[in-house]
Image (cartoon, helix red, strand yellow):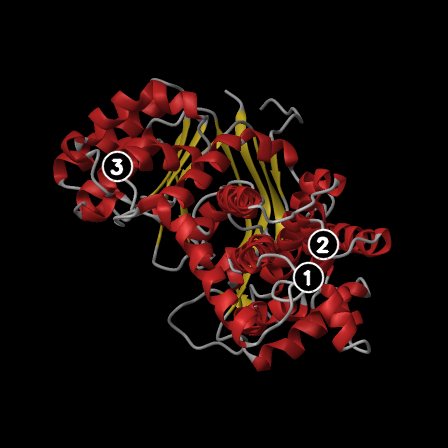
Amino acid sequence: MSTVIKVENLSKAYQLGDFGTGTISRDLERYWARIRGKEDPFLKIGETNDRTTKGESDVVWSLRDINFDIEQGDAVGIIGRNGAGKSTLLKILSRVTSPTTGSVKVKGRIASLLEVGTGFHPELTGKENIFLNGAILGMRKAEIKRKFDEIVDFSGVERYIDTPVKRYSSGMYVRLAFAVAAHLESEILIVDEVLAVGDAEFQKKCLGKMGDISKSEGRTVLFVSHNLQSVRAICNSGIVLKTG
Amino acid sequence: MLENEDWDIKITAQNNIFDLKLKDVWQYRDLLLLLVRRDFVSFYKQTILGPIWFFLQPIITIVFYTLVFGNLAGIPVDGLPKPLFYLAGTIVWNYFAECLTKTSTVFRDNSALLGKVYFPRLIMPLSIVLSNLIRFGVQFLLFMILYMFYLFKGTVIVPNVFLLLLPLLIVMIAALGLGLGMIISAVTTKYRDLAFIVSFGVPLLMYTTTVIFPLSVAEAKYPAYSWLVKFNPITAIIETFRYGFLGRGSFSWELMGYSLVTTIIILLLGTIIFNRVEKTFVDTV
């Protein structure tokens, strides 16, 4: 077993409130501090991320000094309350946004499913969207073509495959989207809580698929959920996030 | 635990501004083509005329230009057939304007997508430039049809060797639109003021270049202000295009050189700024 993800001192600060004429002077101040090579003055006053109380400053640390390693083939469940930083962590891992400080090192390809149907174009048909979505998630065209039947079969929406997805029910939408993501050939799969919309049968199918991915194919899965039962069912280790 | 240092991906706060990740872009080339296809197909979905709309837009535009600017206002057009004169300017300007406006809102238009999944961000503006290139190609075809029509009618049109510069002109328009668009898109991620200027400014900017009037008229009528028209780097491109295909108008190496240098500077600047912003824009857009 080797480490595939190594997270060191990872932090991420967010600015609260509205952006407007008031924030530009502060931006200029920060820029000036950076030019002089000084520390960002507004990060020093950052506060821990507690959603329930009113704070003094409007800079919060969504994540603060996170350290962990993940081994190959692990299925890791990430749990925590709303706003604890789970999605922020996943966003950084999948390179959607970058951390304020610290670093993450990754071995292998990452496929992330932070939201179902990202990049689905409502006017395009199910078939066209499978190709588009697959490509957005990093698959090559030939790869998608090879797996096309498998994807359609898994999704169970064959009947509607030549209909624009704007006519789909939300459950069908999720089915198709997860089917594409589940057939990615990446070494690491990141799944945010996305399965809530599917029916019981499909949820079970997805959890089973994720279990397969980590157990029999030796790939790494990171999974965020509020459903402790399903986390327990497929994960062999977990991370609990508390106010970052 | 085995400690080896050959990580595939390193995620840190810093970004090397000159590292364009062109290798990543190449890996995602299928996505680029699919996005172009998406733009193209979704453009005429649920329409009866379908792709014919690509022709109709410029045809209707030049009919109006001919009526209003040509006949009503009576702006001379270097003795060329009016529709041909306007079409030449319009297709070049449209390509530039489309690239610019679409690229300048690329982060905002696609924030839902870009905020949820990673792919090289450069793909997005590149797909805009490519899909508009196809549109330009279609409109250029229309230009050639009209061109042939006037040739058969016996109108004297003398093309010259400068029409061979067409590929360079196309690259320059694309680069200008892309570069300027990327600068604006990067600046508007946090503060959107500039986006307002773009939405009403770009149509107005058309009057500062030689779409509806030839450079010679500007020089004759407003000698003191004609530098303003020349200052717009698109002017040299449109003038060269017209000169090459229609044989009238003007061509000067100085104007072309100025335009080329400006284009290169804007493209470089745009890429650097875009690269700086692409990593964290999702937090502020």
Q: Which residue is mark 2?
A: B248
Which secondary structure, mark 1? loop
Label 2 is placed on what type of residue?
Arg
Residue A221: quarter of image = top left
Contact between labelled residues 1 and 3, with CB atoms less than 8 Å apart = no
Q: A113 and A129: which one is in front?
A: A129
Q: Does mark 1 fall on the same chain as mark 3? A: no
Q: CA distance from mark 3 to mark 2?
A: 51 Å
- Asked if B278 appears above or below A37 in the picture, the reply is above
Q: Counting other residues with Cα less than 10 Å from the Cα at mark 2, is it few (<14), some (14-19), or many (20 or more)?
A: many
Disc with the residue nearer the chain's start (2 vs 1):
1
Mark number displayed over residue A126: 3
Residue B254: quarter of image = bottom right
Q: Position of residue A162 (x, y in %)?
A: 21, 34
Q: Position of residue B168 (x, y in %)?
A: 71, 42
In the displayed orientation, state which residue is furthest to the bottom: A22
Q: A15 and B76: which one is in front?
A: B76
- Asked if A4 appears above or below B135 in the picture, the reply is above
Q: Position of residue A184 (x, y in %)?
A: 39, 27
Q: Which residue is mark 1?
A: B78
| Horizontal side of residue A182 vs B79, given as left or right | left
Residue A159: quarter of image = top left
Residue A232 makes an appearance in the image:
no
Mark number displayed over residue A138: none
Looking at the image, is mark 3 or mark 1 nearer the viewer? 1
Q: Counting other residues with Cα less than 10 Å from the Cα at mark 3, is it few (<14), some (14-19), or many (20 or more)?
A: many
Q: B171 and B285: which one is in front?
A: B171
Contact between labelled residues 1 and 2, with CB atoms less than 8 Å apart = yes
